[in-house]
Amino acid sequence: MAQDDVSDKNSRHAVGPVRRVLDYSAYLRLFPDLAKRHSDPTVRSAPNEDPYDRNDESFLWVGFAFATGIFAYFQLPEEPNLWWVAALMVSGSLYGLRAHLRPSFTSLLFRRMSLLMMALWAGVFAATLRTALVEAPRLGEARWFTITGTVQDFEKSETGLRIVLAAERYETRSNAYIPGTSYGAGSLPMRVRLSRVQEEEIQAGDRVRTRARLFPPAGPVVPGGYDFSFWAYFDQIGASGFVVGAVEHLGQVEASQTQKLIWRIDQSRIDLAARLRLLLSTGSQQDEGPKAETELIVALLLGDRTGLPDEDVETLRVAGLAHTLAISGLHMGLFAGGAYTLFLAVLALFERISLRYPLHKVAAMAALVAATFYLLLSGASIATQRAYLMIALVFLGIVFGRRGLTYRSVVLAGLLLLLLSPEQLLHPGFQMSFAAVLCLIAFYTRYEGGGFQKGLRQWQASAGLWSSILTTVALWALGLMLTSLIAGWATGLIGAYHFARIAPLGLVGNILAMPLFVFLIMPLGILGLMMMPFGLALYPLLLMQTVLGWFLEIARFVVSLQGDIDGYLVPPSTGGVFLLLCGFFLCIKVTRHSDKRFWGPAMALLLGSALMLVGAGLWMNVVPPDVRIADKGSLIGARDQLGRFHLSRARSSFVSDIWLRGEGVDPSTYDDRKMDLSQRSCDAMGCVYEVFGAKGAAGPLLLAVPTKLQSFARDCIFADLVVSDLPAPQDCRARYIFDRDRRHELGALALWIEGAPGALSEGANGLEPDHEYNVRIEAALPKLRRPWHSSR
């Protein structure tokens, strides 16, 4: 016996640790069902059970842990050390691998938890590494420069072109600098974004010289809001600004073949969009310019939405149809699915090919090539990339004989995108896209897993022709309604969080308009693209233009049904996160209908519903700030005695629109939200405002905005809050002081006034509130700067 033990040890030692790591069968022990099938091919699942459902769900948790690691990194109060993060990830991974390779010493639960921790640390490391790799110089303060550089990208806007310039040289009146040189509080950036460019002949690859005013990347306009400096950092854009005067062309720059190919693809999209506009305007005999339907065609086929009229975009948004403008899974599915059907039909015409080769696999590979072409043609946005990866996995599943549309394929698509760009986890488009797909797969997996489909087929086989047709139509309409409801619920919560807006009648709009979109609009558009090389694109595109007119009329009809309901609401905070997590939990647990060892469907529904109620309660308790202060300038937002939010400036702006949306108010009602003389008092020295807590529960407090140094003498005595772009004197006795340096440090501010009601009375320092109060302050910028805020 002892000799057998020694020989067994020697044999294991002979295998070596490297081969044990490469032995993938060890990892299959994490998923017992899959390991059993791997070791015994005769094992098969029950007829109604997907053999990979359980493994898909485990893989889903791995993807969720990876995303959690990325999210945790972006929530850290300060930047971690890359090498420490790498060391922790490697040590944790080695420990986890040791547990997996010696399963007799650890439980299955421990091995699964160690795998999740490995995925979590991998997410933290991926985000930390990405942040370090994209580090680039950023401007520290506003300056005038004459810039020479190469146009890398451009798009049209109402005020002219917006271009991204790869800078080569910066010139001032006395000196010239190269990018990366220290300048003031920052460095001269490698890439800048410029607006108000009036030249129409600019193309990617052009070398230009122009005069511009540059600013550091702006921070959030509200605490927790969209952070422009964050996204500029990961785009490696170190400054933004506007052009003054003409742009001088210096010729084309010499670039690599890869860069030239990218520019050529972008220019092809622009040329094709111009050709479509010219073709449709000529074919429809209109001289007044392209119609809204023409611009919709360009947007749907090429992803170019720059020419869409704002009122039509707003109509589609209110009607819940704005998702059709983003080239995503629906568009990619229709295009690639149509290409697959076409290739399959053509190949089936040749008898020798159809008998000798697997046509569905050949058609799948050809359709994948077509999908790649559409990805490049449409601009390759995040939603399009996600859809392309999903379609690629579906077609590869056909090639290798596997199911394509599963949790595993969704997670693989998400992991690929997050490995390349971890910051996309925080993008609304990424969140909406994957939330909708996960919820739909969860629902339809449950639907396919039961016996409903089998019973329906048996009934249709025995029923009459008309009964079968009517049932099919009714079920299709029901499926469209449920799809719209599920996807709308998943994306609506995220939209409410990011944009403070929902589409109240979005379900109605989708039921009425989506049949036109799916069966007529997109097929006609795809047919038009296919016919363009043969000069026959005009006829399907004109028909598409007509149907899009009906599509817009349906959207306008849905908008008319809403009446005075504008869809704006107070965005959720913690409550929104709770709701999303509850929906996620509910979806994945209900699909596990065959698992009787842990949570059954009833328990999952019960627990998920309870968590949703908690999340809804937290959302209802969200209280908007009583006072908002911009990061610079004199714009103030504050409540009056009735608790109604008002703004100090006579004209609306981008910042004021964001503030009103945060109140659940339509920004177009700005004129009704201006402060009147009962709440403000202004002179040449500045302004003083009376501000109150919600519904007048606290206040009034005096908020002073001095515009001259002399006005600090009185404002520091009588005001409770002093806000200014000037430096405050050292002896200022106001309770809360937000002067130039303090505002630069904190960014935009949100204040909640807490205390009992009271009036002003004469005190030692003049007029003071005769009650105790407290002001809770939330700043847009953290005290410890992360890399994307370090230039401020």
Image: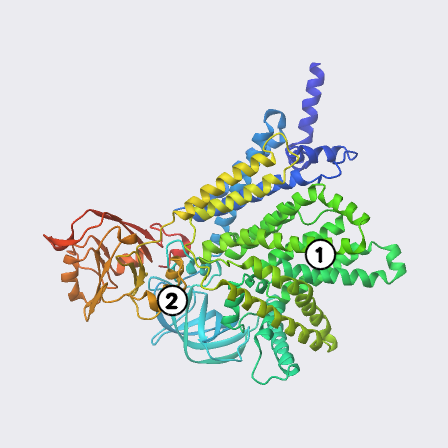
Amino acid bearing label 1 = Val
- Image spot of residue 531 (x, y percent): 73, 73
Q: Name the residue rendered at 68%, 27% in the picture.
A: 12
Q: Is residue 95 left or right of residue 672?
A: right
Answer whether labels 2 and 1 touch (C-beta < 8 Å): no
Quickly name the residue at label 1: 473
Amino acid bearing label 2 = Thr
Q: Is 452 placed above or below 482 here?
A: above
> Which numbered mark, 2 or 1, is in the foreground of this view?
1
Q: Is residue 206 left or right of residue 751?
A: right
Mark 2 crowd level (few <14, some 14–19, many ≥20, 10 Å Cα): few
CA separation in Å, label 2 and label 1: 44 Å
Query: Is residue 264 in sight in this rendering?
Result: no
Q: Is residue 276 left or right of residue 630?
A: right
Describe the element under mark 1 as helix, strand or loop. Answer: helix
How many callouts does the rendering have? 2
Residue 115 falls in image quadrant: top right
> In the picture, which quadrant includes the C terminus?
bottom left
Residue 473 falls in image quadrant: bottom right
- Image spot of residue 620 (x, y percent): 41, 48
> In the picture, which quadrant includes the N terminus?
top right
- Image spot of residue 291 (x, y percent): 57, 77
Describe the element under mark 2 as helix, strand or loop. Answer: helix
Name the foreground residue: 170 vs 382.
382
